[in-house]
Amino acid sequence: MAEGKRVRQSGWTGRLLAFGAGRIFALGAGLALAACSTVVPRGPAPPPPPRAERPVYEEPRVETGIPRDTQRNRVALLVPLSGGNAGVGTSIANATMLALLDTGNDRIRITNYDTATGAAAAARRAIGEGAQLILGPLLAEDARAVGPIARAAGVPVLSFSNDTGVAGQGTYVMGHAPAQSIERVVAFARSRGVTSFAGLVPNGLYGERASTAFLRTVEGQGGQVVSLQTYSRTPASINAAAARVAAKAPYGAVLIADGGATAAAAAPGAKRGSPSARILGTELWNTESGIAARPQLAGAWFASVSDGLYRQFATKYRARFGAGPYRLASLGYDAVLLTIRIARDWPVGTRFPEGRMRDADGFAGLDGAFRFDRSGVAERALEVQEIRGGQTVTVSPAPTGFGR
């Protein structure tokens, strides 16, 4: 359970937005003398002793769940706190606590629930204990399980998933959607004169959505996709797909919609037909601290949220918890900032004012500006980074906000 203490806000955070019963005994005696012919009383008989009554004992009332809190609104955090994803979930939970401490907020109370033992059960318990807003869960399948339960109770869900398919009907997606990253980096490549593109995408849902976004964006930007190949995540399949792309050369850029390790493995083969082609990456690269150290990706471009404020947060996190945070921890921090901003108009004990989620001006956080579109997906202001000299360099800054 993370509860905020009132502390001084840091400068960068301030800018973003605080029971034995006794027994009764009585004795009485009537005295009489017997005589041969008469009985002479010694005086009036004393009154009978008062009747002892058994004291009434009431069982103390015991309430299940967490104690009632009439001073703060109750928010549930649903993340994996055990199992294979416990590290990520714990990092998010720690980040939400830091957000409360940094802002000095005392109007919301956050209670953690472990989704590794069952997301649906965690949601039911949270709602039963009075939660009016759910932050999380992390995984798309958990968000699908939680959504209907929360919707039936009128409780909004602010998921950390990047699967836009779970958004809608009271569920919002805060995760970094691949389509937005692809749109941003393709548009940047076009601004640098790239007209022909090739693509490598993995089999599965992520690859399907990446393919759709890639084809739509290149066409919308007036470019041409000369080859788009799929692969399974095995070395042989990756190399074969890269060879098929190379056979369609020349092209100016190749999108590899996968993590850094796969992109580094595929890049040499994909550039064989066009050595000067730029490698394009997705938001997945920003979650890997060692991405810039891969020489195969030198000169590559990828779009992601800005790391400026995140680096300051990571320093504070490391000082408090003795280890660095997972990159996704920023989602938990920013979810709390959003909640605190809306909580100004959220009387304690009432339903969360979901309508405020559609604020046209958006919200500010560690990951920059964001706002929710009509479908409930977070639209983000992204920057473009280049891998250069073993580090990432911003070559196109993110917008600072959204116009109406």
Image (cartoon, rainbow, N blue to C red):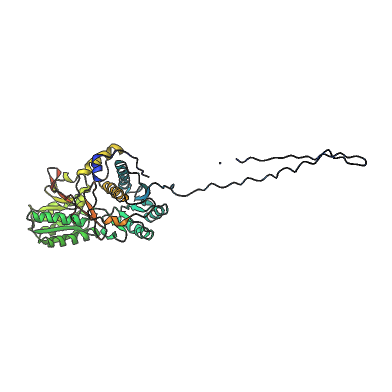
Residue 116 on image: x %, y %: 36, 51
Give coordinates of residue 302: x percent, y percent.
16, 51
Query: Extreme right residue here?
Result: 36
Q: Quadrant of the C terminus?
A: bottom left
Query: Number of numbered discs present?
Result: 0
Of 301 and 293, which appears nearest the observer? 301
Residue 103 vs 219, above or below: the answer is above
Quarter-of-image position of residue 196: bottom left
Quadrant (top left, top right, bottom left, bottom right) of the N terminus: top left
- Answer left or right for 3 relative to 251: right
Quarter location, residue 181: bottom left
Outermost residue on the front side: it is 43
Residue 351 visible in the displayed image: yes
160 with respect to 401 (left or right): right
Which of 319 and 157 lies nearest the eye of the viewer? 157
Along the viewing direction, whichever of 98 and 163 lies nearer the viewer = 98
Q: Residue 36 sits in which quadrant?
A: top right
* 386 is higher (above) or lower (below) than 249: above
Q: Residue at x 93, y 42 (%)?
A: 37
Name the residue at 74% across, 39% down: 27
**Residue closer to the observer: 149 or 39:** 39
Position of residue 301 measured from the top left corner of the image (x, y, whole percent): 13, 50
The location of residue 272, given as percent across then percent down, is 9, 54
Does residue 118 appear in the picture of this structure? Answer: no
The residue at the point 15 percent across, 60 percent down is: 217
Q: In the figure, is residue 376 to the left or right of 271?
A: right
